Amino acid sequence: QVRLVESGGGLVQAGGSLRLSCAASGRTFSDYAMGWFRQAPGKEREFVAAISRSGVSTYYADSVKGRFTISRDNAKNTLYLQMNSLKPEDTALYYCNAANAPGASIRATPGAFWGQGTQVTVSS
C-alpha cells in the first residue's frame, strides 16, 4: 500500500504560480513512477504530467507543456508540480498517482494509488 498526501493548492490570480507537493509513504518511493491528474467540476479526470522512477523522463499534457514542471525527490519521498502562468482553465482538484509501471504508461493507465487531492483555483 502506498499512501499519498497532496498539499500546496490554493487560490491564485491568472498568471500566478503554485507548487504542489505529494508526500508518499508505505512503500519504496523510487519503485514507483508518479503522475499528476486533475478533475474540474462536471468534467472527467485528466492527465497532467508523469515522471519516471528515476526522475530522468517526464511527460506532459499538451495543455500544460511549457508552463508546468513535474519533479521528484526520492530521498524525501516527495513528488512536485511547479505550475507557472496559471490560467482559469487550470482550476481543478489535483491528484497525485503512483504506478508500479513505466512513467510513460501513466497517461493511459494510472496506477492503483491515489491521494485525496488538493484544490487549485485560478481567478481571472
Image (tube, rainbow, N blue to C red):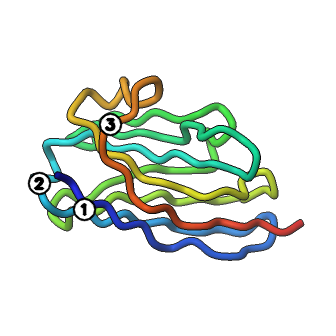
Whether residue 11 sits left or right of residue 101 in the image: it is right
Write down the residue under mark 2. 27
Look at the image and tell me in which quarter the C terminus lies.
bottom right
**Tag 3 and tag 1, C-beta contact below 8 Å:** no
Regarding mark 1 in the picture, which secondary structure is present there?
strand
Amino acid under disc 3: Gly
- Label 1 vs label 2: CA separation? 8 Å
* Other-residue count near label 1 (Cα within 10 Å), few / some / many at <14 / 14–19 / ≥20: many
**Quarter occupied by residue 94:** bottom right
- Label 2 vs label 3: CA separation? 14 Å
In percent of width and height, residue 60 lies at: 53, 35
Regarding mark 3 in the picture, which secondary structure is present there?
loop
Whether residue 114 sits left or right of residue 87 in the image: it is left
* Other-residue count near label 3 (Cα within 10 Å), few / some / many at <14 / 14–19 / ≥20: many
Looking at the rendered image, the disc whose residue lies closer to the viewer, 3 or 1, is: 3
In percent of width and height, residue 92 lies at: 67, 56
Q: Residue at x 31, y 47 (%)?
A: 113
Amino acid under disc 2: Arg
Q: Residue at x 41, y 39 (%)?
A: 50
Q: Give the residue furthest to the front.
A: 42
Write down the residue under mark 3. 111
Write down the residue under mark 1. 24
Mark closer to the chain start, 2 or 3 = 2
Mark closer to the chain start, 3 or 1 = 1
Amino acid under disc 1: Ala
Q: Please name whichever residue, 113 or 70, is drawn nearer the observer in this view of the structure.
A: 113
Q: Which mark is residue 14?
A: none
- Label 3 vs label 1: CA separation? 14 Å
Q: Residue at x 42, y 66 (%)?
A: 6
In percent of width and height, residue 17 lies at: 65, 68
In percent of width and height, residue 111 lies at: 32, 36
**Tag 1 and tag 2, C-beta contact below 8 Å:** yes
